[in-house]
Image (spheres, coloured by chain):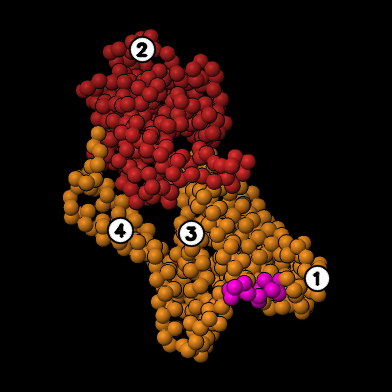
Amino acid sequence: MTKGAGSQGSTASAGRRDKLSVLLTLLHSGPIVILIVLLTIFGALADNFLSVRNIQNLLAQSAIVCALGLGQFLVILVRGVDVSVGSTIALSVVVVATLTGVDAPSSVAQILLYPLVGLTVGLANGVMIVKGGIPQPLVVTVAMLGIVAGAALLISGGNTLVGVSPAVHWLANGKLLGIPAGAVLVIALCAVFWALLRRTQWGRWLYAVGGNPDVAQWVGLPRDRLIMSAYALCGTMAGVAGMLYHGRTGSASPLSGAGYELDAITAVVVGGASLFGGRGNVANVLFGALIIAVIRGGLQQLNVSPFWSSVAIGVGILIALELDVLRKRVETRIRVLRARQVNA
Amino acid sequence: MSVVIANGVGSDSVAGRKTVLSIRDARKSYGFVTALAGASLDLHEGEVLALLGDNGAGKSTLIKAISGIVQIDSGSMSLDGTPLRLRSPAEARSAGIETVFQDLAVFDNLTVSDNFLIGHETTWPRWMGRLGFVSARAERESWRKHAAELSVGHVPPGQEIGLMSGGQRQAVAVARAVAFARRVIILDEPTAALGVRESDEILEMVHALPKRGLSVIIVSHNMDHVVRVADRAVVMRRGRDVGQMQVKDGVQKDLVAMIMGAT
């Protein structure tokens, strides 16, 4: 037996491998570096950018995207993507406003109704993708986007109901120890998602399904139900985002949340999770959501046209995707060098 | 008609050994394509059996049938004398049969110990089911214990397997199968993608399996590797078993001849 054969290999390739490992670490910590760089640049250029008030504002703004991103991350983890989350925001807002009225007193049932509407949409997505046997999940959620957006218009009759219950208003606008309540809620949800993904059997299996769906099936994991659970939770989080959105805007419009699906996907990808599936963590989503909020808010404060922030975020997605491809290449290279070393 | 070529000592020499897995007249067609046309095979206790044949000979359908991935149309299988009907990979596994497929081996994005235990995790509290917590530390310990037994202790448990060499990945896949197999372990081309030294490691692992009470079926195209680990070889052609041979040094050419049908 050749124990520790790796240490006897040629030192030249070991050196190259170490360099590649450093590069890989850099790629993994890219999002936090980008966030710090952006904060530094905007902090230097724009007055009051790093003021308490502005940071509170950035946190409140990123809370909705972060909530959506957490759900989206689960779906991307299992190699899917869900573009129906933006219209799910609209549906949850409209359903709550229609069923309970906008000036009804706050109740637990009302607060639970937002995520419940989301869960329903998410389950419908999951069932269609898994049981319907449609190989391209994106298309299913595109169809769902249309259905859900239409449903929101039908239910509301196209009208916007102005008003929101006090509890939801506070969740979106209130502060706990100076931190926006919405941000506190989302940070708590981040902690829950982190524990679910990194510490439970369900989380481990979700990574496994994303890493290699065929092996997952062969090993005997309940692949279909795991994929469905990802979509169900993604919808649920869209409902939570809908609640925060309702609170922030103070009105229930059937056009709420339009375009937010792109921000959610961007947050996940820019934050460093892989569209190839099976890679990333909750911190990626958090950083991704903050990066988007910082780019939007920073450019706004520098009086750059908001059209440019859209371009900047699009470029950000492309860069993030290329870095992901690069990461894959570096990993393969490390593997090859390691094998060469062992067999040398 | 299948031609039985008994070269030197035939099955009589192993008559004293118990038969673990027995397959009789297995047939399987995919539409008009016949994959198995009456294949039979006996695997004896503590034996390393090489399953040989050219591409399309039916080896892979046969091992898929034994792994529960495909169901045979007719014929019979038995394990330790009891009839065996496998409808899924899970049933094969619970019968004590584990298979390592070349391309269905590991999750690149998980660590070594995650890969080792996936599907067999212990969680707490039990009532939480799949939402129960897994203990990474206990799992690393479990890997270290098993890895030491299999002489692959140098593969670190906490490392992501995607960054490892083919040999290390294969070692983890084999270790996983060994840890959970109770009767039979099937290895599909375990050294196909490996360098010389890594192949040596895997072959050493295979060689030690009978001592753990396991019977082994190994599919390989490398006759030198077959000669190093196998006790006996069964050759398939056109969906049938067409001959068998006791494996010893220097039979490489005879094996190739039997595979090619040049008899």
For the residues labelled 2 and 3, say whether their Cβ atoms are less than 8 Å apart: no
Q: Which chain is orange?
A: A
Residue A281's tag is 3
Local SS, label 3: loop
Disc 2 crowd, CA 10 A, few/some/many (<14, 14-19, 20+): some
Distance CA(mark 4)–CA(mark 3): 20 Å
Chain B: what color?
red
- Observer-nearest residue: A131 or A324? A324
Which percent across, then down, holds residue A329? 34, 59
- Is residue A65 shown left or right of residue A14? right
Disc 1 crowd, CA 10 A, few/some/many (<14, 14-19, 20+): few
Local SS, label 1: loop
Distance CA(mark 1)–CA(mark 3): 38 Å
Question: Which range of residues does the magenta coloring cover?
Answer: A168-179
- Residue type at the position of mark 1: Pro
Local SS, label 4: helix
